[in-house]
Image: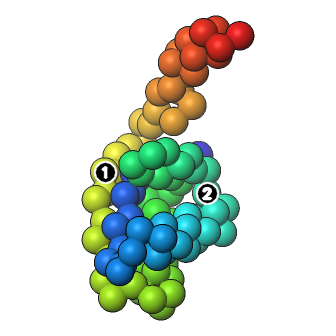
């Protein structure tokens, strides 16, 4: 069971918007390859897992994005950790809003 949730915004230094988006895709591919539960949104990606796995993932993102051509990378990170208690999942936090949106659309 996950004991931590990390929201990460990846901002690689790039010469163009197209290149910046390519590098963000590299970061998201690294998150996907981790096997951790995640959700991409417009400003950040939320990842759930063990605290140690999230910290390792953060390091992998830094390396893969810079090795893919970014001169530097800045990240904005929010991290929630509950070593013993239940930590709210993304699904639990968003369920009522998703239901509301589905009702409006359908």
Q: Earlier in the sequence, mark 2 or mark 1?
A: 2
- Name the image quarter holding residue 34: bottom right
Secondary structure under badge 2? Answer: loop
Residue 89, position in %: x, y?
A: 51, 36
Secondary structure under badge 1? Answer: strand
Q: Is residue 9 left or right of residue 61?
A: left
Q: Is residue 83 left or right of residue 96?
A: left
Residue at 28% from the left image edge and 71% from the top image edge: 74
Disc tally is 2
The residue that disc 1 covers is: 78
Disc ID at residue 36: 2
Residue 13, position in %: x, y?
A: 32, 78
- Name the image quarter holding residue 104: top right
CB contact under 8 Å: marks 2 and 1:
no
Can you say which quadrant of the picture contains the C terminus? top right
Asked whether residue 100 is in view, the answer is yes
């Amino acid at each position: 069971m996950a004991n931590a949730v990390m929201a990460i915004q990846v901002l690689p230094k790039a010469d163009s918007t197209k290149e910046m988006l390519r590098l963000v895709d590299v970061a998201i591919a690294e998150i996907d390859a981790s096997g951790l539960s995640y959700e991409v949104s417009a400003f950040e990606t939320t990842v759930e897992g063990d605290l140690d796995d999230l910290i390792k993932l953060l390091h992998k993102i830094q390396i893969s994005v810079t090795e893919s051509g970014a001169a530097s990378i800045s990240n904005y990170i929010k991290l929630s950790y509950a070593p013993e208690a239940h930590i709210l999942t993304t699904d639990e936090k968003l369920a009522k809003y998703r239901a509301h949106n589905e009702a409006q659309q359908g």
